[in-house]
Amino acid sequence: NAGVTQTPKFQVLKTGQSMTLQCAQDMNHEYMSWYRQDPGMGLRLIHYSVGAGITDQGEVPNGYNVSRSTTEDFPLRLLSAAPSQTSVYFCASSYGGQALYTFGSGTRLTVV
Amino acid sequence: AQTVTQSQPEMSVQEAETVTLSCTYDTSENNYYLFWYKQPPSRQMILVIRQEAYKQQNATENRFSVNFQKAAKSFSLKISDSQLGDTAMYFCALSGNTPLVFGKGTRLSVIA
């Protein structure tokens, strides 16, 4: 049972480049979400999904796109990377209303 | 909107002593969950303890216990017999009808 798998673990981008952070879970969880973690700011919600085909914005959605075509996958897209998007990104999933969250190991992204 | 406030950016405690981390929150929902997560330098998010708001009894997990004051919207974490391995960032979090909302964290150092 792999849990929540995030790839890549580390990435360096140049300003203006695009990329996709991958998140996959094998627990048949309905809920998936993306967070960014910055020093002194805790984890802030970027986007989330309550099921395939359904997504919604969180606290800091600007500059990021998501889609949820399958239950298993919830990729996060940066269309034009900016230095302000340098952060550690976490994906998490949970099953319905049980509020038992599983986190991925995180992606450290640096935009230069 | 849901908010979580951790007023202690940093704390330290002597090994084998007891320490309490503070957390206050705000929500308009009646059904919600409260959490404490531990994040060691590996950046893995580890669930320490989970409290269901409708349960009056305070949750405990071995050396970790909470003081849940629902009317005051307070959710503090007590760590007894502190160990060097408890050194980490600790995040308080809240989940209701939306995904987890985190506080900014408390960095705990356990000193030998």
Image: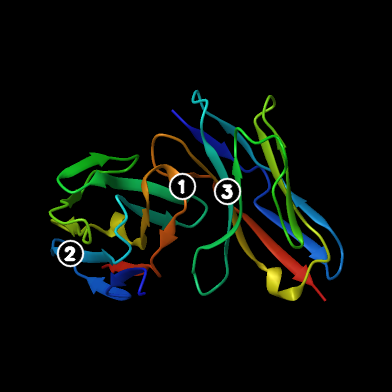
- Which residue is found at the position 33% from the left and 63% from the top? A27
How busy is the neighbourhood of tag 1: few (under 14 within 10 Å), some, or many (20 plus)? Answer: many
Give the secondary structure at mark 2: strand
What chain does badge 1 belong to?
A
What chain does badge 3 belong to?
B
Badges 2 and 1: C-beta atoms under 8 Å apart?
no
Residue that mark 2 sits on: A20
Foreground mark, 1 or 3? 1
Give the secondary structure at mark 1: loop
Residue A99: numbered disc: 1
How busy is the neighbourhood of tag 3: few (under 14 within 10 Å), some, or many (20 plus)? Answer: many
Give coordinates of residue B77: x percent, y percent.
71, 50
Marks 1/3: CA–CA distance: 10 Å
Apparent side of residue A106 relative to residue A70 in the rendered image (left or right) = right
Name the amino acid type tagged 1. Ala
Image quadrant in which the N terminus of chain A is located: bottom left
Seen from the viewer's position, the closer of residues B81 and A95 is A95
Give coordinates of residue B103: x percent, y percent.
54, 45
Seen from the viewer's position, the closer of residues B104 and B2 is B2
- Which residue is found at the position 17% from the left and 52% from the top? A68
Measured along the vertical axis of the image, is residue B17 above or below residue A29? Answer: below
**Quarter-of-image position of residue A53:** top left
